[in-house]
Amino acid sequence: MKKSPLQIILFAILFLFIIQSIGTLVESIYILDLMNTSLDEKALGVLFFFGPLLVLPFFKKDQRLLIWVLFGLLFVTHGVIPFLSTANRLVASGFATTASLSLFFLLITSQAIFSRWIPAGLALSVGLSTLLRVAGHGIEYSLIPTSGWVGWVLGLLLGVCLFQLNVQRVADAPHMGGKRTAPILGIYLILTLVYFSFSAPAVIARWTEGNYTLIVSAVSLLSLGWVWLAISRPNFQERISPRWVMIWNLLFPASLTLTLLAHRVSFPPSLDSPPIEVGAPSLLQMLPLWLMLLLFPVLYLDLGIFLRQMQSTDQPGRSLAPGILLGSISLVVLIFINIFTNVWGYIEPISPIFRNTFWLSYFLLSGGITLLVWFALRGKTAPENETSDAHAWVWTVLLAAIFLITLVLSLPSPRAQADADGKTSLRVMSYNTQQSINGFAEKSFEAQLDLMRQVSPDIISMQETDSTRISLNNNDYVRYFTEGLGYYSYYGPKTVTGTFGTAILSRFPLETTRTSFMYSDKDETGVAEAEVEVGGLRFTIYDVHPDSSDAAMLAFAQALLQRSQDKPYVIALGDYNLRDYEEPYQLIDSAYTNAWTSVYPSEISTEGMDMSGENRIDHIFLSPNLTAIDPTYILPPESATDHPVHWADIQWVSP
């Protein structure tokens, strides 16, 4: 097998499958537990991460047979993932996770593989993952049912590469001491960090409110550039001295942690604290981001260091067990730490200590990698000498094509050309999308987009949209809806703040976008705010989603009225989690007009839809100088979520 082309492609696809399988497994567990906002037996799905330990005893058997057994399991279970229900997707992705990780460790311990090709494979997998993400407008393209064929094609290509392998335990592999636990842990940490962020650059954009196209381009260009260097300048890594390796490794976790801390919000500490307003990020806040993006390829360098450290001839397969066990435990713990920063109000007594600590899992990951690299550099690793590939120009063309396609697809689609002059009405919608999951715990982003297209609102206030995190497989549904509708959008609170998300979409350009954080003792309350110019008037939009104690909900209502009291045309809509008999609701209702009750005082429509009492927590409130026409609720399951979707036409008299 010619080393560079097929080995790089093989490991690129294998790493991509590992990331996709782990991401889908975590997502499936989260979705099923989202239905009851607590952990239950479905969380035991994380045991699939420990599956490779059960495969290790077979590593000394017929390795070629084992490779094909693992490939067959991976090919089938990964291929069917896009077409399954959530519960079945959990099982399939679990087996795919076990198979892909087992296959990876079997290959690197039984093959004479130059350790530079595996990092190049990881770099190519990041480039491919980025391409698939932009192709799906924020959603992993190959995991969408209509494009699930991509996974089968990649699986076949992986099989072709494996077929070329001459599987045997290599007698002349360089001996590096056989100390495998630390480097295997380092490999797990690198894969975890790539899965958490760099495999889906939209994650980084939502951390920081940074330019999506620039962030995507940076991750793609630097990853594909690493592949090109590995092929055309194969010995360039050996020219980097240990001193510069450590400097690089110290700067990267520092810049990554500073990137997250720069966008951390100090929430109001008490009921009477004023809201904290957060607007567009400053240049100073963005500097750590761009430094981090320049430095992140150190992960590929570190992977090569760990691989050279662990490859050995005199250690049995079971010597991998401590490293795999420790790596799996670390992966599970870091996943829970990351998710607990978002659901800290629901899983007591453990999760509350992780409130507002979104940075922590990334600091532990990057800092742990740096520490393990320092230990690795204290030992000796055998040098590798490899000549450049004679067909490097083919790779140059291929890599350039991947980058250019990624760049083009990352550009914003044309926005709707709506004429705001002379208008005397707006259609506004409140839509709690429940992170694009319906009431049956199944993905519903396509049905939700279809519903929005049918209603064709001018402004959409969305709640529970903060899906660009590992709990929802880093899927950016707000971007998917924005591109699908051709609207302008404001994502609202950044993911580092730990809210469940409030996003605003509009036919008209959004101005003065900002988020106000109000006191909360359960979920972080981040109100997305924006202004639009329509018909010569300036409307202020408030997208709300509070959920706290009675006292905190009253403080929210008071803060909302205080922030909006000087605005002439207010539309405050969203999932209020308030019924009309509760004091915070009545306080807001005393200042503004409720769209539904202004037309149906009995709270029952002329068609007989009863939205009284407990049935109605999603509201549209308007300034008294605005009039609601034909307010409408669509109930689940037709709403494609667990909430009713609510909209109304708003009219006014031009001054």
Image (tube, rainbow, N blue to C red):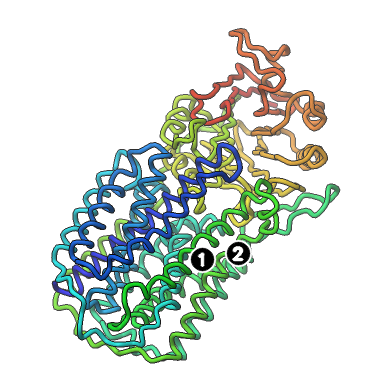
> Separation of disc 2 and disc 1 at Cα?
16 Å
Q: In the displayed structure, does residue 538 sit left or right of residue 302?
A: right
Q: 477 or 593: nearer the eye?
A: 477
Identify the mark at residue 264; answer none if there is no mark.
none
Q: Position of residue 552 (x, y in %)?
A: 79, 42
Q: Does 123 appear above or below 136? A: below
| Amino acid type, residue under disc 1 in the picture | Ser
Quarter of the C terminus within the rendering = top right
State the residue position of label 2.
359
Which residue is located at x 35 percent, y 46 percent?
92
| Amino acid type, residue under disc 2 in the picture | Trp
Dot 2 or dot 1: first in sequence order is: 1
Which residue is located at x 60 percent, y 57 percent?
496
Question: Which of the 4 quarters of the picture holds residue 529?
Answer: top right
Mark 2 burial class by Cα count in 10 Å: few <14, some 14-19, many 20+: many
Report whether residue 171 is seen: yes
